Image: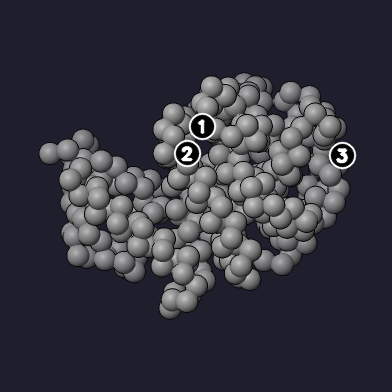
C-alpha cells in the first residue's frame, strides 16, 4: 500500500477525521486512529509530547485529508461560529506552520508557494480584525523549537510592529508575513542546534549560523515564483542597522521590511531559543543589541509583548 505523510500541526482534537491515521515505527505503519474517530483528549498531546512531526495516511485518502483541513481552516476563520479565539488561533497557527514546512520541503512547487502566500494575507486579516488573536497565537508555546513555529511567531510580531508603524498596505503586509514565515529557510535540514544562545555557540556553529540567511536566499533566488521582497527578507533578516550582521549591511542597504523582520526575529530568538521570559526580552534586547535595531522598533515590541 502507498502512504503519504501529513503534519501533526494540522490535526485538531475536536474534529472527527475522514481517514485512517498511521504512525511509522521501524519502517512499519501502525494504525493510530481510525476514520470517524477524533484526536480528542490526550491523543494529540501525546504525539506532540513525543515531538512527532508527521503521521501517515493512505494515498487514496489524501483528498479526505485535504477536505478535513479545509473544513478546519474555514471554521477557524469564521468568527461567527462557536469556537473560542484560542481554538481558532491554534488551528490557524498550525496551518501557517504547515505552509512554511511545505515550502521548505518543496520550494520549486509554484502552487505550494502561492498557497502559502494566499494564506499569509488571510493571516494578516485574522490578526488585525480579532482583538485577542495576537495574544492567542503568542500563547502557543514552541515546545519543540521548530523554525516553522518560530517563523509564525516572527510573522505575528512583524505584523504587530508594522501596524504600530502605520504600514497597512495589504500587499506589503502579505509579503512581510510570508517573508517572516520563511525567513529561516537556510536552517532547513541544517545540523546546527538552534536551541542555544548565540554567545555560547562554538566557532563552527557561529560560522554555520552566519551563513544561513545567504544560503536560504541563494536556494530560492532562481525560483521565479518567489517574490523578491520575500527573498530579501530571507537573505537580510540577520542584518543589523549598524552593519554588524553577517553581510555587514546597514539600514540604508536593507529592504525596509527586512529591517522590521530582523527586529522581530531578534526578539523571538531570545524568547524561543534562549529561554528569556517574554516580560524580560525587550529589556535584554535593548541592552545586548543596542544600536543593532531601530530604537523605536524595540520600544514598540516591548509595548506589544506587554499587551499580550
Q: Are marks 2 and 1 in contact (CB under 8 Å)?
A: yes
**What scheme was used to colour the molecule?**
one colour
User: Residue at the location (72% across, 67% down)?
Assistant: 307
Q: Are marks 3 and 2 in contact (CB under 8 Å)?
A: no
The N terminus, quarter of image: top left
Under tag 2, what secondary structure?
helix
Side of 176 relative to 303 (left or right): left
* Sooner in the amino-acid sequence: mark 2 or mark 1: 2
Under tag 3, what secondary structure?
loop
Residue at which label 2 appears: 113
Q: Are marks 1 and 3 in contact (CB under 8 Å)?
A: no
Q: Residues within 10 Å of mark 1 (few under 14, many from 20)?
A: some
Query: Quick one: 147 or 70, which is closer to the camera?
Result: 70
User: Residue at the location (46% across, 69% down)?
Assistant: 78
> Where's residue 21, x and y in %?
23, 52
The C terminus, quarter of image: bottom right
Residue at which label 3 appears: 291
Asked whether residue 276 appears in the rendered view, the answer is no
The part of the image, by quadrant, that contains residue 161 is bottom right
Q: CA distance from mark 3 to mark 2?
A: 35 Å
Amino acid at each position: 500500500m502507498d502512504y503519504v505523510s501529513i503534519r501533526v500541526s494540522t490535526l485538531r482534537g475536536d474534529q472527527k477525521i475522514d481517514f485512517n491515521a498511521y504512525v511509522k515505527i521501524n519502517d512499519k505503519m501502525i494504525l493510530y486512529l481510525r476514520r470517524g474517530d477524533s484526536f480528542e483528549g490526550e491523543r494529540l498531546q501525546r504525539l506532540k509530547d513525543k515531538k512527532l512531526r508527521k503521521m501517515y495516511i493512505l494515498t487514496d485518502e489524501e483528498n479526505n485529508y485535504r477536505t478535513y483541513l479545509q473544513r478546519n481552516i474555514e471554521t477557524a476563520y469564521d468568527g461567527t461560529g462557536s469556537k473560542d479565539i484560542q481554538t481558532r488561533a491554534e488551528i490557524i497557527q498550525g496551518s501557517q506552520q504547515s505552509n512554511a514546512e511545505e515550502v521548505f520541503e518543496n520550494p520549486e512547487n509554484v502552487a505550494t508557494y502561492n498557497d502559502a502566500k494566499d494564506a499569509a494575507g488571510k493571516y494578516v486579516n485574522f490578526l488585525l480584525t480579532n482583538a485577542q488573536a495576537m495574544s492567542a497565537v503568542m500563547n502557543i508555546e514552541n515546545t519543540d523549537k521548530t523554525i516553522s513555529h518560530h517563523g509564525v511567531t516572527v510573522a505575528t510580531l512583524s505584523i504587530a510592529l508594522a501596524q504600530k508603524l502605520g504600514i497597512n498596505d495589504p500587499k506589503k503586509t502579505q509579503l512581510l508575513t510570508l517573508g517572516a514565515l520563511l525567513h529561516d529557510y537556510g536552517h532547513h535540514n541544517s545540523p546546527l542546534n538552534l536551541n542555544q544562545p548565540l554567545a555560547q555557540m562554538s566557532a563552527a556553529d557561529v560560522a554555520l549560523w552566519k551563513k544561513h540567511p545567504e544560503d536560504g536566499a541563494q536556494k530560492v533566488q532562481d525560483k521565479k515564483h518567489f517574490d523578491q521582497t520575500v527573498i530579501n527578507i530571507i537573505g537580510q533578516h540577520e542584518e543589523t542597522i549598524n552593519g554588524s550582521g553577517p553581510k555587514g549591511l546597514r539600514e540604508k542597504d536593507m529592504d525596509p521590511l527586512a529591517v522590521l523582520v530582523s527586529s522581530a526575529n531578534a526578539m523571538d530568538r531570545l524568547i524561543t531559543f534562549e529561554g528569556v521570559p517574554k516580560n524580560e526580552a525587550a529589556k535584554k534586547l535593548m541592552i545586548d543589541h543596542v544600536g543593532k535595531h531601530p530604537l523605536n522598533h524595540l520600544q514598540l515590541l516591548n509595548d506589544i509583548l506587554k499587551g499580550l
